[in-house]
Image: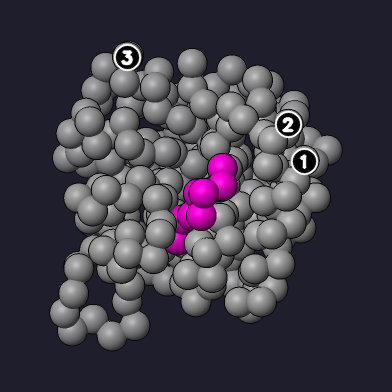
Amino acid sequence: MRTPIIAGNWKLNNTISEAIELTQGIKRLVADTTDVEVIVAPTFTALAAVYAVIQESNICLAAQDVYWENNGAFTGEISPTMLKDVGCEYVIIGHSERRQFFAETNESVNLKTKAALTTDLKPIICVGEHLEDREAGNTEKIIEDHVSGGIKDLSAEQMLSCVIAYEPVWAIGTGKTATPKQAQEVHVYIRQLISEAYTDEIANQVRIQYGGSVKPDNAAELMSQPDVDGALVGGASLQAESFAHIVKSSIK
Ligand code: PGA
């Protein structure tokens, strides 16, 4: 039985005071919610303030990116140790916006994943095809490339600490959600890839989130799919009520 996992990816939004207010709202609304893991991923500048609000609550902290070196001459970067130090338990790696705008590759995703795991941070590895890929019948090829590239050389134990987020790029921020059937099909395929690389038992334990225009009105149907173990939520995570609604929809 996999515990559902809902993460709010706030992207480039919220000042520190806005982040605190949003976190307080979420904390209040999900205070009694059990059997689901709740994660918020603010910008780097708001991590410490958000952590102060969620300490001793049922909400975990994630960062939206990380660098793979722990220190040195890498101006502008943030290390796994720094994220751990500020209270992060998770880190989102390889989001399609980073692949698209910031030259993220499967190689950098893999380096970041390994560095995060070495520091005891749990990676949320994002994978997903563009619309042209889907239309050309290349969805599985892209997913295979992203998954195998991201998890390359991980031990079985490390694999178990990872979460995979399937985010079709055409569904992110567009209001176009994958149908529950489309999401389920790709999730099954991802589980099969993990099973081929490790074992069925490991594949059955790894949680796979869906992301891309998840909203309060479509969350329950997506989450009802047997291989959809939660959601990575962008736009709808910026309002406490809609995020809390999605959290509650994920309980199976
Ligand atoms: P969205 O973003 O929910 O706004 O589509 C999802 C994501 O990019 O993680």
Disc 3, SS: helix
In front: 139, or 168? 168
Q: Which quadrant is home to the C terminus?
A: top right
Could you say where residue 233 lies in the image, as x and y percent from the top left? 64, 49
Instruction: Please state if 98 lies on the left or on the right of 224 as rendered.
Output: left
Could you say where residue 134 lies in the image, as x and y percent from the top left? 57, 40
Task: Give the quarter of the image for residue 25.
Answer: bottom right
Residue drawn where x is 24% and y is 36% of the image: 158
Q: Which residue is mark 2?
A: 249
- Cα separation, mark 3 vs mark 1, equals 31 Å
Disc 1, SS: helix
Q: Give amino acid for label 2.
A: Ser
Q: Are marks 3 and 1 in contact (CB under 8 Å)?
A: no
Mark 3 or mark 1: which comes first in sequence?
3
Q: Is residue 18 magenta?
A: no
Q: Which residue is mark 1?
A: 245
Q: Give amino acid for label 1.
A: His
Where are the magenta residues, as a range?
Answer: 55-63
Up/down of 52 relative to 155, above or below: below
Residue drawn where x is 46% and y is 30% of the image: 207
Residue drawn where x is 22% and y is 31% of the image: 157
Mark number for residue 187?
Answer: none
Q: Are marks 1 and 2 in contact (CB under 8 Å)?
A: yes
Q: Mark 2 Cα within 10 Å, few/some/many (few <14, many 20+)?
A: many
Residue depth check, mark 3 versus mark 1: number of the one nearer the observer: 1
Could you say where residue 124 lies in the image, as x and y percent from the top left? 42, 46
Mark number for residue 201?
Answer: 3
- Cα separation, mark 3 vs mark 2, equals 26 Å
